[in-house]
Image (tube, grey):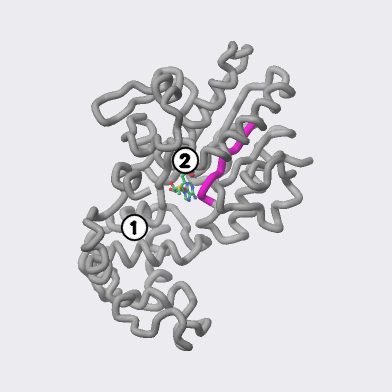
Amino acid sequence: MPGAAIEARVIDRTLPAGEIGRALAEMFPSHARDPSGPSSPAASSPAVNSPAARFRDLAPDELERLLPLVLEASGTDFGSYKEETRLRRLESRKSRLDLRAAEDYLALVRRHPDELRRLQQRFLVSVSSFFRDRAAFRELERALAQWLATGGAEAVRVWVPGCASGEEAYSLAILVLELLASGRQGREVRIVGTDLNSEALKVAARGIFPRGVFREMEPDLLARYFTGHGPDFEICLSLREVVKFEQGDVFAGPPLARLALVSCRNLLIYLKTHLQDRLLASIHRALLPKGLLFLGEAETLGPGSVPLFTPVDSRHRIYRRRG
Ligand SMILES: C[S@@+](CC[C@H](N)C(=O)[O-])C[C@H]1O[C@@H](n2cnc3c(N)ncnc32)[C@H](O)[C@@H]1O
């Protein structure tokens, strides 16, 4: 993971292990100062355990004051995202700018409105890799093979909401092309990844990746679908032909209809329950009757979405559209 994060160029600083403690204490002084520890009575009280209370370098209403400004500048409403990630990201951004007081950061935002866009991109956590959680992809391959065997001549349309830098969309393309290797059986294959993060999408469209993001991918697949350029690998034409990327909010709806598969991995974890249900309902509408849903390993269906999908493999978060 550390190697992959460094190569994906999504981290602020790379340091020897011995220096990380001091650097973290400098970046998050409120945590470093905390003498109570997690087991003290004060630390275990509900108020102290709330996400906001753990970020005492931030004023209580700081995020609330910034969110409408981010919405206005970027069009993204983070109001229904889980608070913890945004608080952590805001604190780290301010620390990077060497700002402590809420007013100082707000003054900077007024002087440089571009900062709000930067904050929006920082709130979006766009880390990915090829075949992330390989065992789950193997099970998905089995479920897709079954779908292909029973799905007539239906096109294979796939949506990857929250695709980040594209690794997941390309992994699915490899998986589908491998399944269809014995001849495309006349099927159209279209895979569309969408994301709000414009920087991540630039990496996705370029299709050149560092070695670290291929850790879970077999070398023979790497040789078949990529060309080496020094330390990096570029996707081959057959992947470029079937995978496209679009910038957009997943709540604006899917980019394709009659979907065979929606791979929505590691996005739901950032959303509050009602927003998860909203997204899953829209995915349900866009899937073919027996279309598949693939979630991240730490994600599951909320109570509002359980009636919409039948588990195919609960452990690996693979579901089939119901109804
Ligand atoms: C942790 S990444 C997941 C990447 C990939 N799906 C994977 O599992 O490897 C989450 C992605 O969701 C995107 N995202 C968050 N909210 C979004 C929204 N409302 N619309 C589109 N993308 C969103 C973020 O920009 C980020 O790239």
* Residue type beneath disc 2: Cys
Side of 216 where 16 appears, left or right? left
Looking at the rendering, the stretch of residues picked out in magenta corresponds to 260-267
* Circle 1 residue: 119
Q: Is residue 200 visible?
A: yes
Of labels 2 and 1, the one closer to you: 2
Q: Would you say the magenta stretch is mainly helix, strand or loop?
A: strand
Is label 2 in a helix, a strand or a loop? loop
* Residue type beneath disc 1: Leu
Residue 238 occupies which quadrant of the picture? top left
Relative height, residue 144 to residue 27 (above, below): above
Q: Is residue 110 visible?
A: no
**Few, some or many C-alpha atoms within 10 Å of disc 1 (few <14, some 14-19, many ≥20)?**
many
Is label 1 in a helix, a strand or a loop? helix
Of the pair 262 and 35, the residue shown nearer to us:
35
* Circle 2 residue: 163
Side of 197 where 174 appears, left or right? right
Q: Is mark 2 within 8 Å of ligand 1?
A: yes
